[in-house]
Image: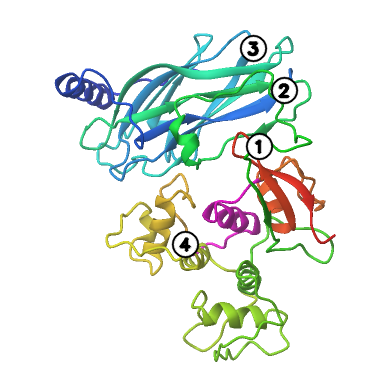
Amino acid sequence: MKLKKISFIYICILIAVTLTSILFSNSLTFASGDMEIKVSTVQGKPGDTVEVPVKFLNVPDSGINNCDFMLNYDQNVLEVDEVRAGSIITNPGVNLGLNTRNLGKIATMFVDETGLGKELIKTDGEFLIIVFKIKSSADDGVSYVDLESMGAIANYELETIPLNFTKGGVKVSDDSSTIITDKDKESDSDKEDSDQIELEETEDLDKPEDLVPGSKEGIHKAYLSGYPDGNFKPENNITRAEAAVIFANLLEVDKNTQSKSDVNYTDLSGDHWATWAVEHVSDLGLFTGYPDGTFKPNNSITRAEFSTVVFKFMELEEPQQVKNKFDDSVGHWAQKYIEKLSKHGYINGYPDDTFKPQANIKRAESVALINRALDRGPLYEVEENFPDVPDTYWAYGDIAKGAIDHSYYVDEEGREVFLEKLND
């Protein structure tokens, strides 16, 4: 992959930030609680192709205007197949430069080329995706992707951003399947050791006969289901009635739960399959009808509407000031909800700086959003029964998390690993 030409504006920014660092400190500060660059840890067999995300966490409100750093990896174990931009880079063709020509090294540079702060990185999420081919001669064990060097990283005011770096990489095992093994949120004890991943080469990440002492176990109930034909139809739009049932299930109410709602929608009869759910969620203020007194249960729910319901369900505090990240959400009735969820990394916009609030949300997108908001899943080492959701589908683990009554345990990497189905 060729390194794109470095623009004049980037050179100016780099010089300015470097001078600032020299004047005010001898080096970048690495301190607890600061922004974090985190390399995920994945697992695969010799000969597999795996994807290793590089994530930005605790991104400051001021955003990232520019950064450059170099990673290293063991070329005797791993071979770079591709490096691509993550979801938090809105205009990678212009703002991101990469160089993988030196074996064992990955150089990356980012800068908001607008010079106006329009394409700053402002949310947590995936900055890069490194696609590695594990060499067939690779021995079992962990092959780390580590920090080789750190250049300038600054906000729009060209102030240096202090940060931590957490290495990750690829755990090679003949008995493994390729699975992503990290989570954005860690326990307090994990954070104390966030400057390194302590993985012994003799560890076995498969489900143990006896859980690791002190590991967390739990139960999650299903809150959504498929269609009568056995399919899930992940690319279908989700209706307002279906969304109401999902949130009613999350609240653990059912048809037999007495509702206090006195809301009467003119287009929702008592024998409608979702009336019970609509009444409960309306009573709690999660859903509202339209000015003409209808609920429109069969209408597809929009991205703005669904984001608003999630915001209210989580009881988030409404922001006093709203940042205009998405151009097409400015002045929209749901702008404050959209911007707040985006700030937390629960939702993403599109590469053209839009959110498309009036576009319909897909079933797979809705379950992924709910799981991120509730800090659930995805679920690993589970077999799903929907024939139209292959295990290679991007939301496979999230759909399984939402569609199966199950017990799980949290492994050493913070993954929620399937134990058994409940209520079979």
Q: Which residue is mark 3?
A: 77
Q: Which residues are magenta?
A: 357-378
Q: Is residue 23 above or below residue 328?
A: above
Q: Nearer the viewer, residue 366 or 39?
A: 39
> Residue drawn 50% across and 82% down?
290
The residues tagged by marks 2 and 3 sit, at their Cα atoms, a distance apart of 11 Å
Amino acid found under the numbered disc labelled 1: Pro
> Of discs 1 and 2, which sits in the foreground?
1
The residues tagged by marks 1 and 2 sit, at their Cα atoms, a distance apart of 31 Å
Amino acid found under the numbered disc labelled 2: Asp
The residues tagged by marks 1 and 4 sit, at their Cα atoms, a distance apart of 46 Å
Q: Nearer the viewer, residue 413 or 274?
A: 413
Is any atom of residue 411 visible in this view? yes
Q: Is residue 170 above or below residue 135?
A: below
Is any atom of residue 296 visible in this view? no
Q: Residues within 10 Å of mark 1 (few under 14, many from 20)?
A: few
Amino acid found under the numbered disc labelled 3: Val
> Residue drawn 53% across and 19% down?
145
**Residue 357's disc number:** 4
Q: Secondary structure at mark 3?
A: loop
Choose the circle earlier in sequence order: 2 or 3: 2
Query: Is the Cβ of the residue at disc 1 closer than 8 Å to that at disc 4?
Result: no
Q: Which residue is mark 2?
A: 48
Choose the circle earlier in sequence order: 4 or 3: 3
> Of discs 4 and 3, which sits in the foreground?
3
Q: Quadrant of residue 203?
A: top right
> Residue drawn 62% across and 15% down?
78
Q: Secondary structure at mark 2?
A: loop
Q: Nearer the viewer, residue 210 or 256?
A: 210
